[in-house]
Amino acid sequence: MRTTLTLLAALPLALMAQTNYDIEVGGSMLQPQNLPYYDPQFLTIDVGDMVTWNGVDGSHNAWGELDVFPTNPEGFGSGVPQQAPWVYSHTFTIPGTYDFHCSAVFQGMPHSATQFGAITVLDPNGIAEVSPWGELSLYPVPATENLTLKIPTTTPLTVTVFNSNGTLQQTTTTVQNGTLQLDVTNWNAGLYMLRLMDDNGEQVVRSFVVQ
């Protein structure tokens, strides 16, 4: 798959557009091959975007209230677990990371053992175009086997990569000595977004292509 520079130029506009994301909710503790799940499990979205959970089978909910996840920027929840079908939507207006899970329990076994997720909400206006840690280099682009990231800093940085659908592709806790190499051999061809963030919440986003 060949991706033109037009897609790269359009990425910032796509990231700022208000979008609705769907999460499928299903599974059962009685079905070892289909345990309780969210699909997708992890998302990255922009401030103002909406996420809709769709219950397709089983009895579940989406619970991200502060009583369970006190570090969430705000609480949200679909209420008590209920039998499918059901739909719950929430619009995220505060940037940050939101954890959530299913609070259902079956015969002492919590669904949250397999049914949990996280949503990262970005503020497009808060993403720096210029790296606060020095010049950032990504090469080669397009990448086919390995993507190398170089940045002249010893500041611990979290590196997160999302695909063009906003689904988490990979996360790494720090950049060691300002250099990181990502193995993209088995990644689907297409456009990806790489985010660098420090402990103070400063972040930079760059796009790259895997071919």
Image (cartoon, rainbow, N blue to C red):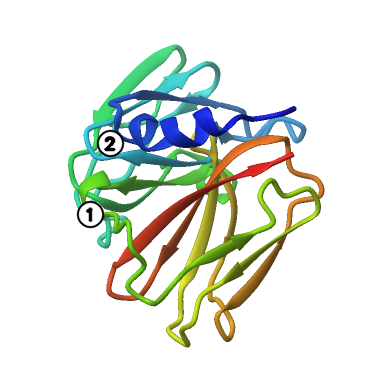
- Does residue 61 lie above or below 120 as drawn? above
Residue drawn at 54 percent across, 22 percent down: 58
- Does residue 52 lie above or below 72 as drawn? above
- Does residue 187 lie above or below 57 as drawn? below
Type of amino acid at the residue the image marks with label 1:
Gly
Q: Secondary structure at mark 2?
A: loop
Type of amino acid at the residue the image marks with label 2:
Gly
Q: Position of residue 154 (x, y in %)?
A: 47, 87
Q: Position of residue 84 (x, y in %)?
A: 46, 15
Mark 1 or 2: the one toward you: 1
Residue to which mark 2 is pinned: 77
Q: Secondary structure at mark 1?
A: helix
Residue drawn at 81 percent across, 50 percent down: 185
Checking the image for residue 126, the label placed there is 1
Residue drawn at 36 percent across, 36 percent down: 15
Identify which residue, 12 or 118, lies in the foreground: 12
Left or right of 41? Residue 78 is left
Identify which residue, 70 or 94, lies in the foreground: 94
